[in-house]
Image: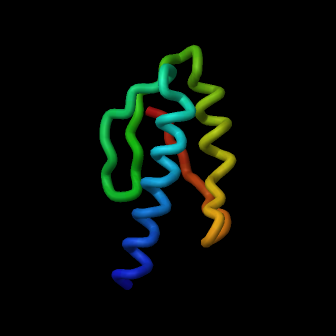
């Protein structure tokens, strides 16, 4: 269980890092909570960000990971 849980966190952080760098000037990362990445997205870039996030993340070693996104 610890290995699986820590791997999920590693994958999450890899993807969060990718999103943060890809949308560097378009989002404001607020915080990471376990496997959740909370960001403030300007309305002008919301659709672009959501579209990218919904694609999910592919890790070269472990495969594809779907992403759930919620808007508040």
Residue found at x 43% / y 54%: 13
Task: Identify the image quadrant of residue 53.
Answer: top right
Quadrant for the C terminus, please.
top left
Q: Nearer the viewer, residue 14 or 48?
A: 14
Q: Nearer the viewer, residue 48 or 69?
A: 48
Residue found at x 33% / y 58%: 34
- x, y (%) of residue 18? 53, 43
Quadrant for the N terminus, please.
bottom left
- x, y (%) of residue 49? 59, 32
Q: Does 4 appear above or below 15?
A: below
Left or right for 50, reference 2: right
Residue found at x 48% / y 54%: 14
Q: How many marks?
A: 0
Q: Does 65 appear above or below 29?
A: below
Residue, far top = 44
- x, y (%) of residue 40? 41, 27
Q: Nearer the viewer, residue 62 or 49?
A: 62
Q: Does 63 appear above or below 34?
A: below
Q: Nearer the viewer, residue 31 or 17?
A: 17
The colour mode here is rainbow
Residue found at x 38% / y 39%: 38
């Amino acid at each position: 269980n610890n290995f699986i849980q820590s791997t999920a966190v590693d994958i999450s952080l890899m993807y969060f890092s990718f999103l943060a760098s890809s949308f560097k000037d378009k989002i404001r990362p607020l915080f990471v909570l376990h496997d959740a990445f909370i960001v403030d997205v300007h309305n002008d870039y919301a659709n672009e960000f959501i579209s990218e996030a919904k694609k999910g993340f592919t890790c070269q070693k472990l495969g594809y990971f779907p992403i759930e996104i919620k808007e508040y």
